[in-house]
Image: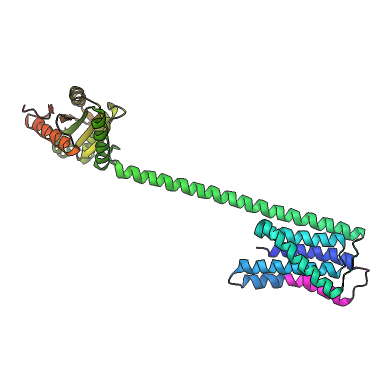
Amino acid sequence: MNRRNRTMSFVWVLLVLAAHMWGRGFGPVAWVLLGLQFLVYPHVAYFVAVRSKNQMRTEFGNMLLDGLMFGIWMAALRFPLWPSYTLFICAAINMTVFRGAAGALLAAAVIACGTLLGAAVFGVHTEPATGPLTTSLSIATLSLYLLVVAKDAYARSLMLFQTRQQLRAKMEEVLALQQRLQEQSTQDPLTGLFNRRYLVEAMERELSRCARAGLPLSILLVDIDHFKRINDAFGHQSGDAVIVHLAQLLRQHARAGDVVCRYGGEEFLLLCPEMPQAAALERAQQYRTSLAAQPLQVGDASIPMTLSAGVATFPEHGDSAEALIRSADEALYRAKGLGRNRVELAGLSG
């Protein structure tokens, strides 16, 4: 990923150094080395890195070599101010992009080693002055290099932002899926009411709360009368419509704290915390009369409906979920036996 920046910046630096070397008596060997360093070397570094098993580590080694060679060139050219500054800044910025502040310090150390090595070979000479062309090319090279780095930083920031947006969207999809799965695990797919799995958790929780506070809790076990006849006479789709209709009726008249569940088939259970026995009986009678008062229209068919219900209250009819449900079920069975379309209270004989 560093090939383009290295290739372009090395060409710009070559122009800077060539402008400085021109007319200063450098022989053909120096010019050949200049060409090899800034025209051939970038491609060799790329091919070495791209074939490496650890490309990032190899490329980091290439950048260290860049800094070392830059230091040697600074000493060989007798430390001209603008070319030396250009070489140092380019190497420092490149290392900083990869390793942060530690990279900048490492770049300075490597360049210093290069200058010491160059000074040992070529001697310590300083000629900081540069001509107008070299100075102008140095400034232009620094400006272009900084703009390229800034452009790459913007592109990476934009890519990171887009990646984060995509991850956020994926996370929202996952959370929505988890919520749907949670709902599916606790809701009846036909009616949208809670199912028996949720009822078990809610009933234990509400019973414990009401027991601690000394409050009543009532349950209503409701069953559609002659549901099999409805299915046989009008079809299963009409039977489903009847179930959905009753579910809507139960939910419509439930309080905010009540839990309405499809208990199984055509049976429903209402968990009513803090509701005394008399209010529970009144509620069950309200459901019964409301359902019987208006037949359900399904297409051209008018389907008459009635329900039977058994009511049980904590603590009179049981002090556990199992005991309360058993008491309500016995009351419901008695309501069926007494002719249906009626409400019976647990513990009564008729």
Q: Residue at x 90, y 76 (%)?
A: 27
Query: Magenta stretch containing residue 94, yes or no?
Result: no
Query: What segment carries the magenta color?
Result: 22-41
Residue 173 located left or right of residue 301: right
Q: Nearer the viewer, residue 96 or 343?
A: 96
Q: In this view, does 333 lie above or below 120?
A: above
Q: Whole-percent x and y of residue 56?
A: 62, 66
Is the N terminus in the top left, top right, bottom left or bottom right quadrant? bottom right
Q: In which quarter of the image is residue 267?
A: top left
Q: Which of 225 and 122 is in front in this view?
A: 122
Is the C terminus in the top left, top right, bottom left or bottom right quadrant? top left
Q: In which quarter of the image is residue 87?
A: bottom right
Residue 235 located left or right of residue 146: left
Q: Which residue is drawn at 23% across and 26% down?
A: 275
Whether residue 299 appears in this view of the structure is no
Q: Whole-percent x and y of residue 333?
A: 10, 34
Q: Whole-percent x and y of residue 46?
A: 67, 70
* Total residue callouts: 0
Q: In this view, does 303 lie above or below 50?
A: above
Query: Magenta stretch containing residue 26, yes or no?
Result: yes
Dominant SS type (magenta): helix
Q: Whole-percent x and y of residue 57?
A: 62, 67
Task: Name the image colouring.
Answer: rainbow
Q: In this view, does 135 lie above or below 31?
A: above
Q: Nearer the viewer, residue 136 or 201?
A: 201
Whether residue 25 appears in this view of the structure is yes
Q: Quadrant of residue 185?
A: top left
